[in-house]
Amino acid sequence: MKKQIKVRKVKNKPFRITKFFWLGVAALVMIVGIGMIIPFKPSANTLELAVNASSLKTIDTKGQIEGFKTQMLDSWQEEAKLKGILEIPKRYQGMTLNAVKPNNKDKIIALTFDDGPWPKYTEQVLDILKTNNVKGTFFVIGNNMKNLPVVGKRIVTDGHTIANHTWHHWYHRLNPSVAAKEINDTEEIIYKVTGVRTNLFRPPGGVLGNGPAAYARSKKYSVIMWSADSNDYKRPAASRLIGNVMRFSKPGGIVLMHDGGGVRDSTVKALPEMIKKFKQQGYRFVTIPEMLELEDQQLAIASK
Ligand SMILES: [Zn+2]
């Protein structure tokens, strides 16, 4: 008997060890598994950090640089939205620009519209941009913002950039205090109507030497000119207007058009076809702050 028991013990011992061993392993696997699943259900922040880290590590390929730039732009826009201000990069503050030079000839183009808000035409332009999912930049006149605040506000709520084009649209030489008032009053009405404080300025008629542009630069505005003039104020046929724009357009270019200041039927007629042509040529549309931010990021990456 004694011997038998001994034998049984010897026989059973490995069985028991094996059974409990595997039960233990199964329990461990479950605990570790659950432990791994919980942290991998990511919060937005964790995911963002992970994406940022991977972008920084492997920034040597073109696709990843593009991704990195898009991320930077997105986070910057979010920040700007929270602040209610579209801060322009430092290197462009107090400067005059008529285009940017994107890396790799990145096919970006900025459509800009001056002299609104204006009855009928501004809303027609906004409708066309909305249909085509295009964002533009509107240089508004302070006095027109006062007269048509609902339309002026729609520029911003539709996702476009609003910018300063003086209160009276005067071309003649202004003394410093009048020049300052032209800019400041317009900045204030834009802020009052839309909640956005702009620091982009375009001088009426492109006149740089009559006072307002110098004041704007001293206030760290970017003075934004253009590289492709549609000459739409001459009311050309739509096909001619499109030709004017396409002939002078290049990556990083800025297109000048008007949604206000007079009869703008030819601008409204030409716009859908112009957008189509740009898209066919592989262009994507950016606002002026987006354009400046993209170039700033490229320059920052290039100088690292
Ligand atoms: Zn103008």
Image: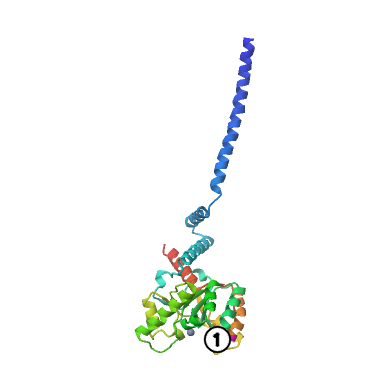
Q: Is residue 71 visible?
A: yes
- Which residue bears the numbered disc 1? 232
Q: Give the image location of residue 68, x and y in percent.
A: 50, 61
Residue 180 counted in the magenta span: no
Depth check, front residue: 283 or 157: 157
Q: Give the image location of residue 29, x and y in percent.
A: 58, 37
Q: Give the amino acid at mark 1.
A: Asp
Q: Is residue 250 visible?
A: no
Check the image and report above or below for 96 versus 6: below
Q: For mark 1, give the secondary structure.
A: helix
Q: Give the image location of residue 167, x and y in percent.
A: 44, 83
Residue stretch rendered in magenta on the structure: 261-265
Q: Quadrant of the C terminus?
A: bottom left
Check the image and report above or below for 303 versus 171: above
Residue at 62 percent of width and 76 percent of height: 276
Cβ of mark 1 under 8 A from ligand 1 = no
Residue 264 counted in the magenta span: yes
Depth check, front residue: 142 or 79: 142
In terms of secondary structure, what is the magenta stretch mainly?
A: loop
Residue at 59 percent of width and 29 percent of height: 21
Depth check, front residue: 88 or 68: 88
| Number of disc labels | 1
